[in-house]
Every structure is written in structure tokens, then in C-alpha cells.
Amino acid sequence: MRASRYLIATQKETPADAEIISHQLMLRAGMIRKLAAGLYSWLPLGLRTLRKVERIVREEMDKSGAQEVLMPAVQPAELWQESGRWEQYGGELLRLHDRHGRDFCVGPTHEEVITDLVRNELKSYKELPANFYQIQTKFRDERRPRFGVMRAREFIMKDAYSFHINAASLDDTYQLMHRTYCNIFDRLGLDYRPVQADSGSIGGSSSHEFHVLASSGEDAIVFSTGGDYAANIEKAEAVAPAGDRPAATEDMKEVHTPDQKTIDSVSEFLGLPAERSVKTLIVKAEADENGESGLVALIVRGDHTLNEIKAENLQGVAEPLTMATDEEIEKAIGCKAGSIGPVNLPIPTIVDRSAAHLADFVCGANKDDYHLTGVNWERDVAVGRVEDIRNVVEGDPSPDGNGTLEIRRGIEVGHIFKLGNKYSSALNATVLDENGKSVVMEMGCYGIGVSRIVASSIEQNHDDKGIIWPDAIAPFQVAIVLLNGHKAPAVAEAGEKLYNELREAGYDVLLDDRNMRPGVKFADMELMGIPHRFVISERGLNAGTLEYKGRRDEDKQDIAVEDALPVLMKASPKTGL
Amino acid sequence: MRASRYLIATQKETPADAEIISHQLMLRAGMIRKLAAGLYSWLPLGLRTLRKVERIVREEMDKSGAQEVLMPAVQPAELWQESGRWEQYGGELLRLHDRHGRDFCVGPTHEEVITDLVRNELKSYKELPANFYQIQTKFRDERRPRFGVMRAREFIMKDAYSFHINAASLDDTYQLMHRTYCNIFDRLGLDYRPVQADSGSIGGSSSHEFHVLASSGEDAIVFSTGGDYAANIEKAEAVAPAGDRPAATEDMKEVHTPDQKTIDSVSEFLGLPAERSVKTLIVKAEADENGESGLVALIVRGDHTLNEIKAENLQGVAEPLTMATDEEIEKAIGCKAGSIGPVNLPIPTIVDRSAAHLADFVCGANKDDYHLTGVNWERDVAVGRVEDIRNVVEGDPSPDGNGTLEIRRGIEVGHIFKLGNKYSSALNATVLDENGKSVVMEMGCYGIGVSRIVASSIEQNHDDKGIIWPDAIAPFQVAIVLLNGHKAPAVAEAGEKLYNELREAGYDVLLDDRNMRPGVKFADMELMGIPHRFVISERGLNAGTLEYKGRRDEDKQDIAVEDALPVLMKASPKTGL
């Protein structure tokens, strides 16, 4: 490609509303432009990288035996009503109606459509397992789209759905997809980790997320220092403290704590550390048969935080987790939220494992401006139901028994799920088994955030000059920068010759033939992250040389003109696609 | 690809609701499945062909110097309000609002978005001309989607938009796109014609459509028998009859024509041919400054039909063309629609060129159940405004003066427009010219119906056994059918060997290793339209042969096993992509 005929839309200024580095650099390098909140146009440069990511994903999916399909983006409401998600999905589902007033949505995911397709097409266990995927534009109406294409409303996703005669076959494909995802992220040059994850609203029994490690990541990822354990903090188990609960040594006392409404202020007021107290959070209980729901108290140690995902997954707790209002709390308990505690609490409680291990602790007295000290389980209040409802913290013992936990930030770029029969059962997707008996299929689903990968790669590969692309997904692998090419025919001619030579060798080459100052051209190529750069100048040619510099190199090197291709092939053995 | 691991979803029965052959065969061959009215899923087989069409379109667009981008499918209403199309576009625009209540549409086309992008990115005439394209899923909420992917609501389109400093540059790119489209349709193996077209609601001064000729086509295409003239009937000029209007020979008479309401019945009643009469159609006039619009009469010869596009393009006629209601006619003229005529008509008239050439003609008397005979222009009524407002008919003289016109059916697969400054002016998309003066850019736009091309190709390439793909877009170029491969290891082994050999030579190969009767497998490969077929049998192998048959061949031929690749390379010199 000749830069003079190409939209190079670089910007010097860092856009004010771009918070993270990938968003800033994608705008500055001229990869994307914002159309509206969460909606981005991909400029030619950005699209080149996006397509290379797509290609790697497609090649590895094909290799795994998955079959590519393309389902409509706009989906009829009927199928979502059949699965129950038309009501459940919430505000992210972009609902609309057509000119005849029929309900549709712009698909955020395609479980319903593929299950409908497969129930009509596959009739026998002999046709299983089958795994169908697509690479497609999806829409999720995020309440707060942010970080550019990282959390956009419209984005490109690879979604795959597998169908099985039984759970063992699902397990095989699940493992195959796990390996396939590792191959994909390896080829993309990402520093990533597969971690255990919660299955969330999509349902199912087991799931793993693939996270790119980056400080800007929106997820907290938990690792064991001594073993392979890795999980999203949403899922990571907080194991019960070792040993028995310590014995009581204090008497329970009521203390006046005027205006002390938070754990920290109460702790300071009483001169006790936060881990000697509990906090009591009041949430909605699961609705009963009549659709009425009361309240339930969740109790965690003062220095811990509630894990909302764990909590809402518990029987008896409303999903999604819904905090009680101040009015509801006052009506049910008779005090304000800052003074609640388990002793004589008139609603059911669920106590976290660590909180249940405390002795001589502090809690609210269920009376405004009063707390209790020296409280002990069983002696002063029955501990009742104990569950894992808190977020792990650094230093917690690892659930696999190997070492302790450390926490890092991650960007979710892939997610694989065992759906089981959630959708196949709702849509009655059956095949005949070996005995001619109708069996509901087992399903798996497997997503990759294709457009998000582009941003994630930048989060891991940049410096103060701009992006540093891995060769595999660079928009161009090589830049040839001509110095005064418009004035020096020899430079233009040598550039043209090298351009053709490198392209014939299979490289994606950008020939920077623009009539601009050298410094501007160098800065653009660096900002755009082109991994390899040749500079052709009149002076160099007179000496029979040109200049090579890798994007990560400290220094440039003068090489013989005829060595350009060999030097490049050594630096980047993989030729263009 | 191994057929045993591939979704081969062929059907014997012709689906009841599929009217045209391509729709029937795409369903029967297992290329697509209907999700809802006008919404189709592409199964693996169909998607392979769709992707090959996309690739050819992309390669030729890239070759022309156009730059690929990807704009959001969901577009904010604001830009459409800026261009004025939010109100104008009508029911085909799928409007919706997001969770915050803001208006959006699912894009049927992207003039507004690209113009907004370009007005922000391009600043100087030096960056022009520029041509941006994308290959993307579009949505048009057709009132009556039909013919499968031929007229679907969701479909894949290649849309390109070019920007220019002046009309001469637009003209250059327009011609380049014309040549590029010819290259694309040539490579796709289509029998097509570029024809002059009306610019329609998209606006602009000049346009050509590219039509695939097929009896199922929804458009009538007009050709000159003696020259190159070709046009959509919407656009084809009906030239004025040669010579002067004949002299009057009859007196004007009022005739009682009870219950004769159509041209045919009046002609029969009077014993005169329809071409001796005129029909008078009453439509809404263009609104005046106060937004009020009266009526206008359009007069064509009795045997001709009104060309609505020509009519609505006329100054003074409301666009879109709107027929007056019976009530409006009675109120303005005082008679029913079947008895209207130009003599003493109290509203403005526009007379077609052929109607204006008549002498001694018949028309309504503006009095129920009465007609006039022997009417003559100027003597009995002023002819007034004469325009071309009728559809041409076979045998009309060609507008280019070479021969007469013939009419065929066509499927529109491409359309190129000179938009001029319609959008750039509305959105104030300017650059600085050589003198530093701000200039509104000229624009062109260029569409190709990518998914429609798949169906169009089938309309031109099929027989009673199924589809006959051209090699360039066949889902697989070659089928290797194993006879009893699961029982005969030699057959399976020979099949595997040939499969690898042909793939290494660059062919897309489907190895039919299914455990099925030979007849079923042959029928599937023929229905699916695979251009080349090898059959491997135990008997053949014993004689050192296998069988080759081209999809269009009458007879199969036995060839030596080792000749398979040479035979294929002769029949299909182009290897796989």
C-alpha cells in the first residue's frame, strides 16, 4: 500500500475522553472513530488488524472441526420468549419492532437461533457432536459503554455452539475448545490466562474465561502462588479459616456509637481492627410461590467485601442481587442500615465462612447509634446458615491447597461454557439416540471478543511512541520510509523496488511515499505500530545502504540494500498472509 | 472437508413457499434456512459460496484503489435528520431507540455515516479523490420480503462512497467503478448488463444498474436491437413519434358510453383500437409554499402505461407519485375516474409525447358515462405541457437512433450513482481547494448486493438436478465420492490420497465418505452443484481407474487413477483460493 493513497489519520493530541491507553492509541493512530456512544467506525488501518484477528480465529476454529455459519443479526422475539430470556435479559437487549409491529431484537448472542436451527436440521445421534460458529457483529446496549472498542455497544464476536448426545461428548468438545482458544491467543501473541469463571446469566454448569493481563482490565483475576489455580474473583472460592472457632473471652455489651455509620468509623471509634467486626447487608430474598419476597441478611467480616455473584447464586437470594432500600430496612428491622447486626435480627441470615469463625466481635445492635461488642456465635446468636459469600483477598489460602492467592487485573477476551440442556430443553431440541429414543441435546457455547482483542493487544504492546504490533496482527508488517522521495528519483526507484520485492515475499508493506518531513513520517509509523521499518535516503543509497529498525529496537542499523529481505526474514520469519 | 463431518442438509421436496428456482435450490441444497420473514441463516455450504463472492468483490475493489472500512450497523438518528432522510425514508428504515430513549436505525445504507466520517477526516483537495467501501450486513424492512435471499430484509451489501474536489474527478471514479463492476461480474461468471437507471430516492444526477438477466427478474430491462443502448424501463426514454401530428379529419362528438370504465371496454364499445384513445390519470401535484397541493392530470395513449418514476421526477408532480382518491377526483372534476379527459379539464395537464401526437382520438368527457370521439389537439384543447411519461414498449424506436427496443427481465446486483453534492451539501462536508477556499465535495456511491449475487448465479446456472456452480464461487470445486468406502479399505485409502493431492494443488475438495447409497450421494453432489466429481470404487481401482464427470457433462469418463489431477487441471485451470 502506498501511504499517499491511504487514509493515514494520525493525531498528535491525546483525545480527552479516552481513559485507557488502547483507546487513546486507536484514536491517535487512526484505527477507529467514534460515531456515537459505544459505536465505532473502523478506519482502513484498524480494519486491517481486525481482519487479521478474524482470520486467525477462523483458521483455528476450522482446524478444530467447527463449521462456520452466519445467522441473522436481527432475531424474532418468539425464540427469546421460548427460552424465557425475552423477559430476563434486561436493558442490554436492544428490542425493536418491525413495520408490521412484530417484536425483534438486535442479537447480543445467538443461543436461541442456533438451537432452533439445529433442532430442525439434526435428527440423529450420528450427526453429533456438531459445533457451529460465526464471526459477526453483535449489539449489547451497555448502560455505560466505555474504553473505545473494549466495551462498545456494537462489536464483533466469534460465537460457537456445540451439540452433543451426552455430557461426556460435551466435555470432549469443551476441552477441544479450551485447547483451540489457547492456540488462538498464542498465535495472537497475547499474554493471557484461562481462569475458572461463573456461568452468569447465560446459564450452565461450568465455564472458563480467557483473560489478557493488563492493569486496565475490568476484572480481578485470582492466581495461586503455589499451583495452577486461576479464577475470576467472581468465582474464586474463599475457603473456611482453618481450625475451630476461638472461644469467647468477652461479655456482650451494648455501646453507644453516635454518628458512626461505617465499619471503618465504628472500628476507629472502638479502637478495634475491622476484622474484629461484621457487616450486615440486607438484600431481597427469592420470591415465594406467590411472587412475594422478603429480605435476607448477608453477613461478612468487616474487612471483607460481599461477592455479589456468589450471593445471588445462593438459594433464597433474589437474582439479580437487589439491595433493600432504606425504607424497607427501617420497616423490617426498625433501625438504619448502619446499625444492623445478627443478634435478634428478625429476618433470615446467611453468614460468610470467615465471619462465622469470629469470636468476641463487633456488630450493629439493630438500634440506631448503638453497636454490640464481645459478641459470640452460638452463645449470643445462632450462626445458622454459613456460606462462601465474600470476595477473596490477596494472601487468602488457595482453594487447591497450594500456596496463597494473588490478584491481578484482566480483560476478558474469551469465554467457554458448558450450557448443559438449558436452551435445548427450553426449545425441545432433541435427536434420536442409538435406541431410537428422543434425547434432549447437551450444549456448549464458546465466545471470543474479536474487536476487543485488538484493544487488548495494544494494552500489552505499546510504549510512549505508540503501538507495537506483534507481526501476526500488524496492519502492515513493514514500513518503507522514503526520505525526499518526491525530489530524489533514485530514492523513489529504490523504494519501489524494495516494495515489490517484500510484497512478492509475502509481506504486508506500507510504502511511505508522502511528501512530508522525515520526523513526521517516523512518528506516524511508530504511532501506528508497524513492527519493521526501512528508511531509504539519497545519502544511504550513495553508500549502497539503507536503514533497518525493528519497532522494539533501541538502535537503527545500516544494512546493504540487497540485504533488506534477508534481514527482514530473520526478524520476521512469518511472511504475510 | 469430509462430508461425514459436515452439515449436508439436502432436501428432496421442493419447499412450498419458494417461488423462484434459486430460492428452491438454496433451500433444497442446504445453503440457507429461514428464521423469519426475510431473515435467513446461512448454513456452512451456503456461507462458503457467499464468502467467495465477497472475496472477489473485495479483491477487485482493492485493485481499484478503494479502501475498506467498517461502519456501525446501528446509526444515530441525528445524521439522518441532518440529511433529511429520517423523515423521507419511509417504512423500510428500521427505526428503534436505545435504553436511554435515543433514536437510532439499523442501517439500510451509509451515505450519512461516511459523509460524517469524511467531513471530519479529510481537510484538503490533496487527499482527494478517496473511495471507501465496506462489506456489511444491511437491513431494509421490506413490506413484502420474498424470493429468499433475493429480496431479504437482512442482507449483505458492498457499499462504496467516493469523494471528489469536482465533477470531473467524480466522473473518473465513476468510470473506474463501472469497469471494476464489470471485472467483478465477469469473474463471478454472470451473464449481466450495465444499464442506465433512475437515481431514485438516493438522489444524484446519473446512475447505472448492473443486471443479471433472468426470467425471474423483478426489473424490466430495455435493449436496443441495433446498438449499445440499455436502460432500466424506469429510465428508458420513449422518444417522440417521427413527423408532424396528423391533421384532423373528424369532428369532435360526445358519445354515451354507459358502464364503460376502462380503455379496453371503451375501445371495444366504440370499435376503435386503444391506441386511438388517451387515458387521463389524476395525481397529487407538488406542494406549494404553503404546503398545499392540488391535482395534476397525466395523459398517455390508451395502449401505453404510465411510467411512475418519470412522472414523479417531473417538476410539479408530488414525489412519491400519489394517485388522487375517487373523492378528490369527483370534487375537482365532477365525474368519476373512468370518464376524465383533457377537454375543458379544470386542472393542469401533462401530456405524453405519443399521446400528444394523436389526431381524431377518444377521451373521457369529464361527465359520467360519456366520452368524446374525434378529438384533436389545439383545435379542441390546447396540448400544453408535453413530456416523456410513459413506459417504452417492445418495438419502440431506440433513443440512440439504432434500431428498436426489446425488453428482458433482470435482477439488479449492482448500482453506481453520481450523488453530486446532495449529502455533502446537507452535512456541509467541505475541503480546502488549491486556493485555500472551502469547497463542498462531490460524491459517488456504488453498491453490490453480495448475498443476492449468490441467488442470481443460481437463476442462471441450474438444471433439473440442481445447481451448477461456476468454479469461482462453488462451495467446493471438486467432490470425491467413495463407493462403499466404509467397507472397502482400498477405496477409503485411494480417496484419502486423492483428497490430499487435490487440496495440495489448491482445490476446495469435499470427500463424500458418508455411509450412504451411491445414488443418494450422486444426487446430493449434483443438487449442491459441485462442478467436478470423481467416483472411486473397488471395481475401478481393480482396473486402475476412477470416474470423472463435470457437472455439465453428459457422460462420465473412466480415467487412470494417476490422471485425476491433470484431468481436473484441464477442466478447471483455476485452483482453489
Image (cartoon, coloured by chain):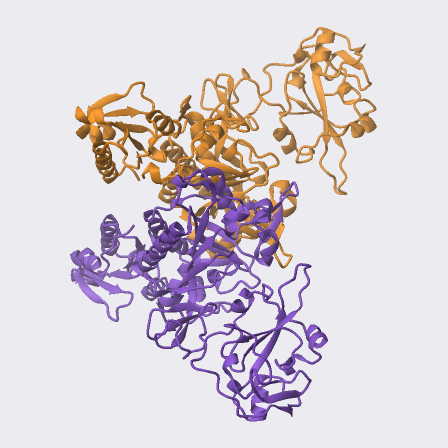
Chain colours: A orange, B purple
| Residue sitting nearer the eye, B454 or B163 | B163
Residue at screen point 57% across, 18% down: A393
Q: Visible in this render: residue A336? A: yes
B104 vs B39: above or below: above
x and y, in percent, of residue A230 in the image: 48, 25
Indicate the quadrant where residue A475 lies.
top left
A528 vs B518: above or below: above
Q: How many numbered discs, if any?
A: 0
| Residue sitting nearer the eye, B66 or B42 | B66
Q: Is residue A344 left or right of residue A451?
A: right
x and y, in percent, of residue B423 in the image: 51, 50
Q: Quadrant of the N terminus of chain A?
A: top left
Residue at screen point 65% across, 78% down: B345
Q: Visible in this render: residue B72? A: no
B34 vs A480: above or below: below
Residue at screen point 65% across, 32% down: A312
Q: Quadrant of the C terminus of chain A?
A: top left
| Residue sitting nearer the eye, A428 or A4 | A4
Indicate the quadrant where residue B454 lies.
bottom left
x and y, in percent, of residue A549 in the image: 29, 24
x and y, in percent, of residue A412 in the image: 50, 32
| Residue sitting nearer the eye, B174 or A59 | B174
Q: Is residue A519 left or right of residue B539?
A: right
